[in-house]
Image: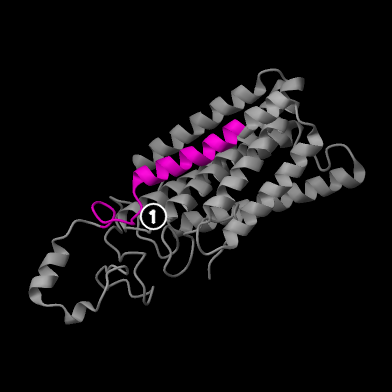
């Protein structure tokens, strides 16, 4: 069963047939390296079977020895074959989505859009993100629409914070970049190993975190003030740090998704989903840092 929540999961987190998930191959260099291709169809529990390419046309059992030799001597998927996801695809799509977020945020900041417009943009972005997350295929229009409205919201909320704590948005941006680079280095050096246990732990922690924040917001709406105090004072610092750590964990899972997609020759449209996941994680980290720094500034 596939989990499609845009915050709690990524496109590839599935128990069968999905990359970067419970059936995914381990990171390169890990002790369990060499398991079956997570894109391969069939029984996900048959780990002893040799890796197969689910995108190869025809029945391999009917191929001649010469054809088999040509097939096994061919380059890996994603290098010379067309229609396969590459790292350049991921970088380009991520640049497009993040660029749209930045430009929209700048427009909202310069135009000094009211808070109500920012809240409306946040709701539209949430709806678009949910629709995309429940689709089985990537929709560039939905992803770019999400980036546009999310950028408008970030521009409005950043200006609100800047009016009270001058310079705080730039501090949050620098902090987000630092977290991104730190997680990337830790992932590439295998200090962080994304496996099924890691994903389950992050998923459970994220669910608990979101529920607590929702309860805190409910109490704040009913009783006023800071609700249960999870977003201010000492507890606010603790939960802010937890939020940043969760965002970093989401980034690590995004890197795993990209690595597996390129390695196993995922369809090129999967690069849009990778860009979508990276954008979600970076926005999450930025908002958590924005709130966390504001607490320290107080």
Residue 53 visible here? yes
Q: Which residue is at 73% across, 50% downward?
A: 212
| Rendered position, 48 above or below 294 | below
Residue at the (37%, 77%) spot, across then down = 43
In percent of width and height, residue 46 lies at 33, 75
Q: Residue at x 40, y 50 (%)?
A: 258
Residue bounds of the magenta highlight: 77-103
Q: Give the number of callouts.
A: 1
In the figure, 268 relative to 192: above or below?
Answer: below
Colour scheme employed for the rendering of this structure: one colour
User: Taken as a whole, is the magenta stretch helix, strand or loop?
Assistant: helix
Any magenta on residue 197? no
Question: In this image, 216 relative to 91: left or right?
Answer: right
Find residue 227 and report its horizontal and vertical position in percent: 84, 42
The residue positioned farthest toward the right in the image shown: 223
Query: Looking at the image, which is closer to me, 288 or 103?
Result: 103
Which quarter of the figure has residue 221?
A: top right
Q: Going by the image, does 226 lie left or right of 267?
A: right
Identified at 67% across, 35% down, the residue is: 154
Instruction: Please state the horizontal and vertical placement of residue 53, each as a whole percent of the image.
Output: 28, 67
Q: Quadrant of the C terminus?
A: top right
Task: Give how far across and how far down residue 172 sits, in percent.
Answer: 60, 27
Decide which of 191, 87 is in the foreground and name it: 87
Extreme bottom residue here? 62
Q: Which residue is mark 1?
A: 268
Q: Alpha-carbon neighbours of circle 1 within 10 Å: few (<14), some, or many (≥20)?
A: some
**In the depicted structure, whether residue 17 falls above or below residue 225:** below
Rendered view: 81 above or below 221: below
């Amino acid at each position: 069963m596939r989990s499609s929540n845009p915050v709690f999961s990524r496109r590839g987190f599935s128990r069968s047939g999905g990359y970067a998930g419970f059936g995914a191959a381990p990171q390169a260099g890990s002790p369990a390296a060499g398991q079956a291709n997570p894109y391969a169809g069939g029984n996900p529990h048959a780990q002893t079977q040799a890796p197969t390419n689910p995108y190869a046309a025809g029945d391999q059992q009917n191929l001649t020895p010469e054809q088999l030799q040509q097939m096994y001597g061919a380059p890996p998927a994603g290098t010379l074959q067309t229609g396969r996801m590459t790292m350049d695809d991921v970088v380009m799509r991520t640049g497009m989505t993040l660029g749209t977020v930045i430009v929209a945020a700048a427009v909202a900041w310069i135009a000094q859009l009211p808070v109500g417009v920012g809240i409306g943009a946040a709701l539209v972005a949430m709806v678009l993100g949910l629709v995309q997350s429940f689709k089985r295929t990537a929709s560039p229009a939905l992803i770019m629409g999400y980036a546009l409205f999310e950028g408008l919201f970030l521009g409005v909320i950043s200006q609100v914070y800047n009016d009270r704590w001058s310079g705080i948005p730039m501090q949050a941006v620098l902090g987000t970049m630092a977290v991104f680079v730190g997680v990337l280095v830790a992932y590439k050096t295998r200090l962080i190993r994304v496996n099924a246990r890691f994903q389950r732990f992050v998923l459970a922690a994220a669910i608990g975190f979101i529920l607590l924040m929702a309860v805190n917001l409910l109490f704040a709406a009913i009783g006023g003030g800071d609700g249960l105090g999870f977003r201010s004072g000492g507890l606010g610092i603790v939960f802010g740090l937890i939020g940043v750590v969760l965002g970093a964990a989401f980034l690590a899972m995004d890197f795993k998704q990209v690595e597996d997609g390129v390695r196993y020759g995922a369809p090129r449209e999967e690069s849009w989903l990778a860009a979508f996941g990276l954008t979600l994680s970076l926005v999450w980290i930025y908002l958590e840092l924005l709130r966390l720094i504001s607490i320290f500034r107080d």
